[in-house]
Amino acid sequence: MESSLCALLLLGTLALQETWAGSHSMRYFNTAVTRTGFEEPRFLAVGYVDDQLFVGFDTDSPGQREEPRAAWMERVEQEEPGYWERVMRRARETAQHFRGSLKNIRGYFNQSAGGIHTLQRMLGCEVSPELTFQRGFCQPAYDGRDYISLDLETLTWRAAVPQAVNTKRKWEAYRSIAEEWKAYLEEECVLWLKKYLEMGKDTLMRTDPPSARVTRHTAPHGEVTLRCRAQDFYPKDISLTWLRDGEEQPQDTEFIETRPAGDGTFQKWAAVDVTSGQEGRYTCRVQHKGLSEPLTLQWEPQSSPTWLIVGGIAAALLLLPAVIAGVVMWNRNRSSGGCLAEV
């Protein structure tokens, strides 16, 4: 980016917010964390396109280099000569920027030099299926709580906590800060997202249909729960709906959020409490982009609890990639937010 503010952030966009069906997103997650016995905070940054990890940076890594985390990123130098040198330099600059900002914020909170504290930011944009800008977000947080936000429509700042008023006053003195963020989120971020989608289209634009099954669970006191579970699917947008005698049961359904499985696919389940003996009245409807038509499943008491394999191979549940350890997600439904210039 031409401005010094945005140049620090070409590193990318950090998330994990739910995306709109059919949309695409790019997010970077940046985290600076203080450590007992270390003079400088550790800084980590990871980037995602459509919730697929593609780049990572860690000040504790040898050489402090930005590294590819997806196979298709190995070819980026062919498309953008000098790419890795540029992003490595900006990542190091961002790390220093975050360390200074973390020190300033601790002063605003009147906190001593000791203790563990974190400064985080999620930065990114979403585009429509036609690849036009839909929304941007830049959300800073301190110790896991919102700090300040930017309204992209009015280009005004909102302090989420009293201590952030210091930053609000500083940034409002320079309207160009808000204007630069708006330009980055609506233009540059979209440009790079389009480039990454093209480079990684074989992976990012694919569709893997879900494997699904219904299981029955009995609690210690006899309560019965039916669980509809889907896995091995991509992209992450999926709908699981419980029906009783053909009628949807949204108020009685418990969901877990869609989760990465660790192998590039996702998993999700939805559960409903039922009266013992009434299980046959319930069906689970599964809808996903990879299915030609919705699946309709029921619990079958005489069958073994095998998976209905629609596509792919059932994967063992894995933890989130270790590279995002320490990154805390917050405010999953905010449409836009503010960023750190110099707090």
Image: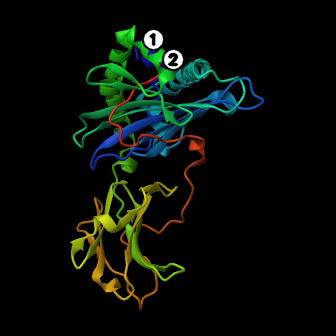
Q: Is residue 239 left or right of residue 101?
A: left
Colour option used: rainbow
Q: Is residue 206 left or right of residue 10?
A: left
The residue under label 2 is which amino acid type? Val
Q: Is residue 84 left or right of residue 239?
A: right
Q: Residue 230, located in which quarter of the rendered image?
A: bottom left
Specify the label residue 343 is tagged with: 2
x and y, in percent, of residue 264 in the image: 46, 54
Q: Are marks 1 and 2 in contact (CB under 8 Å)?
A: yes
Q: Secondary structure at mark 1?
A: helix
Which image quarter holds the N terminus?
A: top left
Above or below, 119 against 250 in this view is: above
C-alpha span from label 1 to label 2: 7 Å
Q: Nearer the viewer, residue 74 or 265?
A: 265
| Residue at the spot of label 1 | 170
Q: Secondary structure at mark 2?
A: loop
Identify the residue at horizontal 35%, vertical 17% (top origin): 178
Q: Nearer the viewer, residue 280 or 321?
A: 280
Identify the residue at horizontal 48%, vertical 41% (top origin): 54
| Neighbourhood count class around disc 1 (C-alpha, 10 Å): few under 14, some 14–19, many 20 upward | few
The residue under label 1 is which amino acid type? Lys
x and y, in percent, of residue 201 in the image: 35, 45
Q: Is residue 109 left or right of residue 267?
A: right
